[in-house]
Amino acid sequence: MEVRIVSRELVKPSSPEIVQTKPPHKLCLFDQLTPLTFSPLVLFYSNPDTTNNLAADSFIHRLKRSLAEALNIYYPFSGRTGPGNLFVDSFNAGLPFTLARVVDCRLAQFVKRKETELLNFLLSRQPFQREPKNRGSPVLELQVSVFTCGGVALAWAASHKLVDGSTFKSFLTTFTALLRGQPNDIISPDFEQASKLFPPRDPSPENYLNLMETLWFTEENYITRRFVFDSKAIGQLRAMAAGGGGAEMQGIRKLSRVEALSCFIWKCCMAASKAVSSAAKTSILVEAVNLRQLTNPPMSDAAIGDAFWWATAAANPHDDSEMSELGNLLSEAIGLYRGDYVESLQGEDGFEAMSGYFEQLEGMFEAEKPDIFALRAGADSGLRVRISGGGNRFG
């Protein structure tokens, strides 16, 4: 497949005189502890009139205009990371925008192909790779690729230094509301709540950030595969994770659909590890937990930043763990965040509690090198993106 770059530009806020008066956006502690890497999201939209490619050109013009308007509201997304891992500034620097055309390929043909690595051709940068820790990294990038039928792919690359799933949901909801001409659907962001509840450290805790980078960027060969589970299969997995008597009868919080699937993937990974390893290893699952609704009082869903952290569950390598046992371990790990632990992470004393987390993490690596499987669920953010009343069309 060939993708030709047509142009590259910077989309800037449409009201720069307003944006330039904004103070630097202060990172929260979890932003500081999250490695600088980019997460992808690719959205496909069909052209209702495949005989008229001018419709795609008109759509792209409207898209850039709406994007510039959205950056007036979400101005840090047009900025650059500042020095010291402390803030984002330079809000008029602009969001990198790439326009590309896919040669001899229709959208319907592309989405039927099973090689998930082809999605990388639609992105402006490679996802999930270690980025250099220097000043001036963008927060968000967009590549728009036009297929021969006039359908388009919007391929976002979001910096995890500021953007988690809920943050991205708020931005995309606002952007698409402007694109559809429905300003009542705009979500007003809260830029201060995360850094007030979880204040950053100055200087930045680079020793802990380095440990997180070690966990995130191991030297291995990776492949990407897509597996589809229908609602019936998910229901069966939830029942297996709950055990024969059901979660409620055992007094255990019932796992969500995503958590049950996490347990199934964890069990499969453990089996694969045992098949290729000569020695049994402790198996650790770390699952992202959104903290917004776990604080007291709850944070706004529109609180901007990495308001999440990792629940850690460890399985004995000598046990042939059933799904229900793994479900209990994961439920217990997530349950920790539903008590006083989240409160202990808040305020100026929160760093002390976070230090305890990292000491525990370091202890896991002193005796042996465990298997670590990290999972995060975009589905839990409730992301739904609609450009027009017809669903996935832009006409």
Image (cartoon, rainbow, N blue to C red):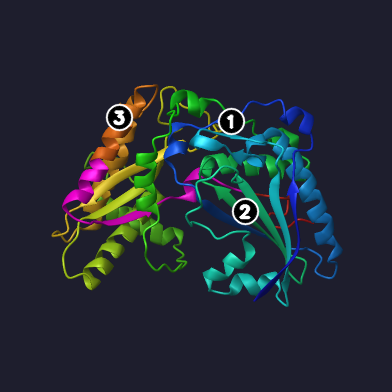
> What range of the chain is rendered magenta?
360-384
Viewer-closest of 184 and 307:
307
- The amino acid sitting under disc 3 is Ala
Secondary structure of the residue carrying numbered label 3: helix
Secondary structure of the residue carrying numbered label 2: strand
Query: Residues under labels 1 and 2: Cα distance?
Result: 21 Å
Q: Which callout, 3 or 1, points at the residue further toward the start of the chain?
A: 1
Occupied quadrant, residue 237: bottom left
Question: Residue 248: x and y, percent?
Answer: 27, 41
Q: Which residue, given by chain and number where applicable, does mark 1 sit on?
A: 25
The residue lying at 40 percent from left, 56 percent from top is: 217
The residue lying at 73 percent from left, 44 percent from top is: 67
Q: Which callout, 3 or 2, points at the residue further toward the start of the chain?
A: 2
Which label is found at residue 156?
2
Q: Looking at the rendering, in which quadrant would you find the C terminus?
A: bottom right
Q: Is residue 38 above or below residue 24?
A: below
